[in-house]
Amino acid sequence: MSEFSMSRRSLLAGAAALPMAAGLGITKANAAGHMQGPQIPRVNRFGVGDFEVTTMLVGSRTVDEPQGIFGMNVSAEEFAEVSAEAHIPIDKAQFFFTPTLVNTGAELILFDTGLNGAATAQAVEMAGYSADAVTHVVLTHMHGDHIGGLMTDGAETFGNAAYITGQAEFDHWSGTDNEGFANNVKPLAEKMSFLGDGDSVTSGITAMAAFGHTPGHMTFMLDSNDQQFLILADLANHYVWSLAHPDWEVRFDMDKSAAAASRRKVLGMLATDAVPFIGYHMPFPGVGYVETRGDGFHYVPHSYQLLL
């Protein structure tokens, strides 16, 4: 399209809008209205083979002084240099909380439940389902922002679901006095089944151990109709400060050396095999690819590949 045709179309559209604006009482002074503030989509859906995958944003918050969380073992100068190269500030970071729904055609499986049952149930409804339609809830690990939505006002949020989690993860937390585990997981223990590395949730969904963030932290590989996709959970919680630099220490990693080793192993596999993934705390919709870059990795956000 030529510059002239674009300009002419824009002028015609502007001229046509003037009488309507005048009729509505809109003037130059008040046409802008009040500021609405930033807005983030809440639901994102795509296909993986015969599966339908939906990522759901159930919360987002701004945190100050991110080097108190990421890159704890590097200098402030290195942290600032890496951040500047990625065009992100060093005084604030945005956190995202993104459970995932997988519709296999036979099951509706929810991976992780957010901090709050009401918020996650609302997100499931925005995705087109009811909370009662969820057939399985899979817990990648048992930090509070993954188990907090299991219960709502003392009752199961997903009342028709079976519960699945890693045996090592459950065994660790059951030996503690952790309040989140006691309030949200322990009441459901009799309804839970447990798995280990290589075990299946259902046909086409396999658990992969990625210990370190927690003692039994799991990722889950989807494999359908010759397509693969990894639910990464909290293996890497920031696309620059933990994915690009897998050896940078993260405050929430319970075993920091094991977490770094898991990052290198899993991210290396994703890069080699060109497998896309969803990261629970990645910028929403949290879906992307990994490529090797230098001694680390580089995050490539999903655009439209999984929509085709």
Image (cartoon, grey):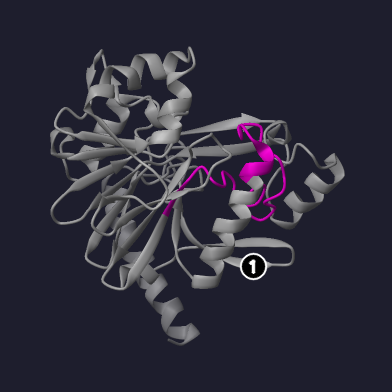
Residue 144 visible in the snapshot: no
> Taking 84 as reference, is 270 left or right?
left
Q: Decide: is 259 above or below 228.
A: above
Judge whether 32 appears above or below 147 on screen.
below
Image location of residue 122, percent across then percent down: 25, 33
Foreground of the two, 182 or 157: 182
Which amino acid lies under the numbered mark 1 shown in the image of this protein? Thr
- The residues colored magenta run 231-259
Residue at (64%, 50%) from the top-left corner?
A: 261
Q: How many labels does the image show?
A: 1
Q: In which quarter of the image is the N terminus?
A: bottom left
Q: In which quarter of the image is residue 51?
A: bottom left
Q: Is residue 102 visible?
A: yes
Residue linked to disc 1: 292
| Residue nearest the observer in this picture, 87 or 54 | 54
Specify whether residue 238 is painted magenta. Answer: yes
Residue 186, horizontal then vertical, whole percent: 33, 18
Residue 142 x, y percent position in the rendering:
44, 29
Residue at (37, 66) in percent of width and height: 228
Task: Give percent across and percent down for residue 9.
Answer: 38, 76
- Pick the residue in front: 114 or 58: 114
Using the rendered view, name the quadrant where residue 62 is placed: top right
Magenta stretch: dominant secondary structure: loop
Q: SS class of the residue under badge 1?
A: strand
